[in-house]
């Protein structure tokens, strides 16, 4: 459990918006308040943990509570080490069928991915209207929050609005430019089944230390030749994930795990 006691690991944790600190009084509302009072049956004097928007975790004591509003006093900052990875990973996931995106968000949140971008590609089958897209994105954001709580993370990954492929390419270009302006290195990975000459491990071991990695993942039918060529023209590194064909909902998990392992974050 990475040094945490069993009692600390089971301490209820709730994410709050904004920044807080010892001595502050905050309100926990909505479904979290209902979970505290109805499911956990916690009340005045009980201790829980809160995590603010900066990813800082604090212990807090319940002052008062009712079904839709719990008031807590922030007591002290947690002494636990950061459980967020040193490398910021973005998964740009080609929009898959059914509930596969739910699995992508949940599983990759658990291992440490920091951001998700749902992308409509040439071979994406689901092409929801704007209203449908908004509902799906809200669902994925809820899943990211739930998975963050379950896995003991100190921040909830961002889930951006659905983008077209061209917008996603420009997004990665802008991010890489911004990172360089801040003195950081950003890598754009493009796993593709037709890439045979270089594996992802080879790229990650070329000697450059990346603080940010952006990962394109194709939908069920993969990327088209035009999409692959466009990505490479704009700075993406094509790579192989091995000789076996992986499901779209498996690819991001495998790629992110390799990145985190090579960064010393796993194992």
Image (cartoon, grey):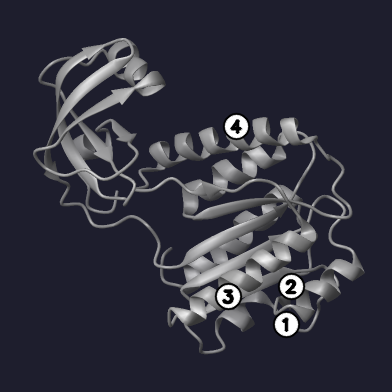
The first of marks 3 and 4 along the sequence is 4
Residue under the image location 16 percent in, 37 percent down: 59
Whole-number angstrom distance, CA of label 2 to CA of label 3: 22 Å
Residue 3 drawn at (x, y percent): 22, 52
Q: Mark 2–mark 1 contact, CB under 8 Å? A: yes
Which of discs 4 and 1 lies nearer the camera? The answer is 4
Work out whether residue 154 or residue 182 is closer to the camera in this orientation and state it: 182
Residue at horizontal 82 percent and vertical 54 percent from the top = 121
What is the spatial separation of the Cα atoms under label 4 and label 2, in whole angstroms? Answer: 31 Å
Cα–Cα span, label 1 and label 3: 21 Å
Task: Say whether marks 2 and 3 touch (CB < 8 Å).
Answer: no
Q: Position of residue 111 (x, y in %)?
A: 48, 52
Marks 3 and 4 in Cβ contact (< 8 Å): no
Q: Which residue is mark 4?
A: 139
- Element type at mark 1: loop
How many numbered circles does the render carry? 4
Task: Residue 148: name its quadrant.
Answer: top left
Query: Would residue 89 appear left or right of 191 to someone viewing this image?
Result: left
Identify residue for label 3.
176
* Above or below 79: residue 38: above
Q: Position of residue 19 (x, y in %)?
A: 26, 45
Query: With respect to residue 175, does 63 lie above or below?
Result: above
Between circles 2 and 3, the one closer to the viewer is 3
> Which residue appears at 57% of the width and 79% of the height?
204
Q: Quadrant of residue 49?
A: top left
Query: Callout 2: helix, strand or loop?
Result: loop
Would you name the residue on which mark 2 appears?
Answer: 240
Quick one: quadrant of the C terminus?
Answer: bottom left
Residue 198 is marked as 1
- Left or right: residue 100 versus residue 33 is right
Q: Is residue 267 visible?
A: no
């Amino acid at each position: 459990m990475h040094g945490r006691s069993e009692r600390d690991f089971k301490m209820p944790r709730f994410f709050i918006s904004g920044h807080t600190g010892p001595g502050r009084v905050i309100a926990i509302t909505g479904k979290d308040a209902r979970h505290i009072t109805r499911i956990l049956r916690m009340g005045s004097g009980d201790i829980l943990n809160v995590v603010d928007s900066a990813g800082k975790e604090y212990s807090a004591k319940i002052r008062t509570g009712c079904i839709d509003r719990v008031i807590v006093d922030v007591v002290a900052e947690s002494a636990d080490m950061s459980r967020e990875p040193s490398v910021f990973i973005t998964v740009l996931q080609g929009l898959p069928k059914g509930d596969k995106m739910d699995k992508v968000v949940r599983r990759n949140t658990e291992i440490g991915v920091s951001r998700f971008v749902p992308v409509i590609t040439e071979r994406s089958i689901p092409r929801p209207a704007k209203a449908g897209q908004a509902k799906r994105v809200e669902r994925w954001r809820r899943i990211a929050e739930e998975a963050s709580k379950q896995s003991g993370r100190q921040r909830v990954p961002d889930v951006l609005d659905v983008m077209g492929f061209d917008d996603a390419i420009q997004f990665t270009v802008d991010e890489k430019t911004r990172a360089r302006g801040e003195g950081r290195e950003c890598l754009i990975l493009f796993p593709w089944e037709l890439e045979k000459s270089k594996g992802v491990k080879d790229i990650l071991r070329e000697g450059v230390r990346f603080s940010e990695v952006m990962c394109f993942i194709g939908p069920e039918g993969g990327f088209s030749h035009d999409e692959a060529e466009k990505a490479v023209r704009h700075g993406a590194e094509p790579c192989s994930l091995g000789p076996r064909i992986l499901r779209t909902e498996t690819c991001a998990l495998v790629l992110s795990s390799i990145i985190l392992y090579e960064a010393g974050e796993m194992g």
